[in-house]
């Protein structure tokens, strides 16, 4: 069986969103060149370029543009390639994880040997889908409100309140837990040169910030950002020639909506499909469960997690789903600060989306970059103290987009 491995990664510093300059293609080129140089490769050595594309509004009426949908082809033109296969993937916040899964599948199928997975984004300011589009007005403005009825933080708050209710706990307890998550994540953002926010927050400061949707306070919700990332993946024999620390991809799974999923979520609901889901967040769990089956491992084998925390509740829920245990165990893990770098189960030692803000289409590349550093023992002050063998990256986005990547030391 053909195996695949990460050879090199590169990301830009995440920065303020919504500005039209510099062009996103320049960020793509920057991280591509750095990743190629790290692997001692040239553009002609790439068998495929798989890029994330974007369709978010940049303060324009028509934003589903040709240029934004063809980043792979434009990048190939910019760096100079020779008939390289180019593919563009759009799957909202899970785009980068799904792009990596595509590259992984192509390599394991024997179609290619070396792939560049790359992405960039410049998210619009404010709540997503806040502006009209002359190309798809219903999608841009009214559809999320027709389906969900509220903007993102509102139903994230509903999730948090429901969890507290089902556990028989007062809402104040989960509020305090989320504040602690922010405190812990910010500690690592402060030590990450690529993080946008480097301030260390205390739980008290978080709870003193304005309430957005109770129990969510302002500092519990991620900002929107711009950024870019690149990952070079190769079949294992090639990877071993390019690096002495290949990071093996042992699972790359993705999923979609499940009929009857009871939790309100981004934009999309399944309106048919047979047997109704019997538990909330089944969509989150299914993609994780599928990744475990691909890798031939279980939750106990995961040493470190990078999860997509657009709010501090997301960190809590990802741990619930990744571990598959009683939710009380997640609360104890966080309360005992065991998600720190010196804890039993380190989570988001990058600082997380909480510290970076979200550059939607490439966010998972940041997480894969961090896992690669951690597994190689190259994360500096953020380095996990425990011995690491296997790490997981999880992502979730609009229209039922889910991704789960599992990485393992390949040396």
Image (tube, rainbow, N blue to C red):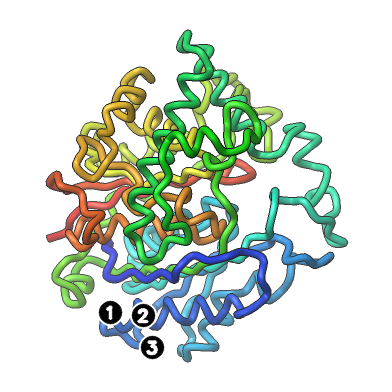
Q: Please identify the quarter of the rendering in which residue 211 is found.
A: top right
Residue displayed at 55% across by 51% down: 93
Q: How far apart, in angstroms, are the residues tagged by discs 3 and 1?
A: 15 Å
Mark 3 to mark 2 CA distance (whole Å): 15 Å
Q: Which residue is drawn at 55% across and 59% down?
A: 359
**Residue indicated by mark 2:** 34
| Residue that mark 1 sits on | 38
Say which mark, if any, is on residue 44.
Answer: 3
Looking at the image, is 165 positioned above or below residue 298?
A: above
- Above or below, comparing residue 114 to residue 308 in the picture: below
Of the image marks 3 and 2, the number of the one nearer the N terminus: 2
Q: Residues within 10 Å of mark 1 (few under 14, many from 20)?
A: some
Q: Name the spot of residue 184 as percent of width and height, x first.
A: 35, 41
Residue 177 higher or lower than 109, as above or below: above
In the picture, the quarter occupied by the N terminus is: bottom left
Where residue 43 appears, as percent x and y from the top left, is 39, 86
Nearer to us in this view, 251 or 190: 190
- Is residue 1 among what the camera can see? no
Q: Is mark 3 on a helix, strand or loop?
A: helix
């Amino acid at each position: 069986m053909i195996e695949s491995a990460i050879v090199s990664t590169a990301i830009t510093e995440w920065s303020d969103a919504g500005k039209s300059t510099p062009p996103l293609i320049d960020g793509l080129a920057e991280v591509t060149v750095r990743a190629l140089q790290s692997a001692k490769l040239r553009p002609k050595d790439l068998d495929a370029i798989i890029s994330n594309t974007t369709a978010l509004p940049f303060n324009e009426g028509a934003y589903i543009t040709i240029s934004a949908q063809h980043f792979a082809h434009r990048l190939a033109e910019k760096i100079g390639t020779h008939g390289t296969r180019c593919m563009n993937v759009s799957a909202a916040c899970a785009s980068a994880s799904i792009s990596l899964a595509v590259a992984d599948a192509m390599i394991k199928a024997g179609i290619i040997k070396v792939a560049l997975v790359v992405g960039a984004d410049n998210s619009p300011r404010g709540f997503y889908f806040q502006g009209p589009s002359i190309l798809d007005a219903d999608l841009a403005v009214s559809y999320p409100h027709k389906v969900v009825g509220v903007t993102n933080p509102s139903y994230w708050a509903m999730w948090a309140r429901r969890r507290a209710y089902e556990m028989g706990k007062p809402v104040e307890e989960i509020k305090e837990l989320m504040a602690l998550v922010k405190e812990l994540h910010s500690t690592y953002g402060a030590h990450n040169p690529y993080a946008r926010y480097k301030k260390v927050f205390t739980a008290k400061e978080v709870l003193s910030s304005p309430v957005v949707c109770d129990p969510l306070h302002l500092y519990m919700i991620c900002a929107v950002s711009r950024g870019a990332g690149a990952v070079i993946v190769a079949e294992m024999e090639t990877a071993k020639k390019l690096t002495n620390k290949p990071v093996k991809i042992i699972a790359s799974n993705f999923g979609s909506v499940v009929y009857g999923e009871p939790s309100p979520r981004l934009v999309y609901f399944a309106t048919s499909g047979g047997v109704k889901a019997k538990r909330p967040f089944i969509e989150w769990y299914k993609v994780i469960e599928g990744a475990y089956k691909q890798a031939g491992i279980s939750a106990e084998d995961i040493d470190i997690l990078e999860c997509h925390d657009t709010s501090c509740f997301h960190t809590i829920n990802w741990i619930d789903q990744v571990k598959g245990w009683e939710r009380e165990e997640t609360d104890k893990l966080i309360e005992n600060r065991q998600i720190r770098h010196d804890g039993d189960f380190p989570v988001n030692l990058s600082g997380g989306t909480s510290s970076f803000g979200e550059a939607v289409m490439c966010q998972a590349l940041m997480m894969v970059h961090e896992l690669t550093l951690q597994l190689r023992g190259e994360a500096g002050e953020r380095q996990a103290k425990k011995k690491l063998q296997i790490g997981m990256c999880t992502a979730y986005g609009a229209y039922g987009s889910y991704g789960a990547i599992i990485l393992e030391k390949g040396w």
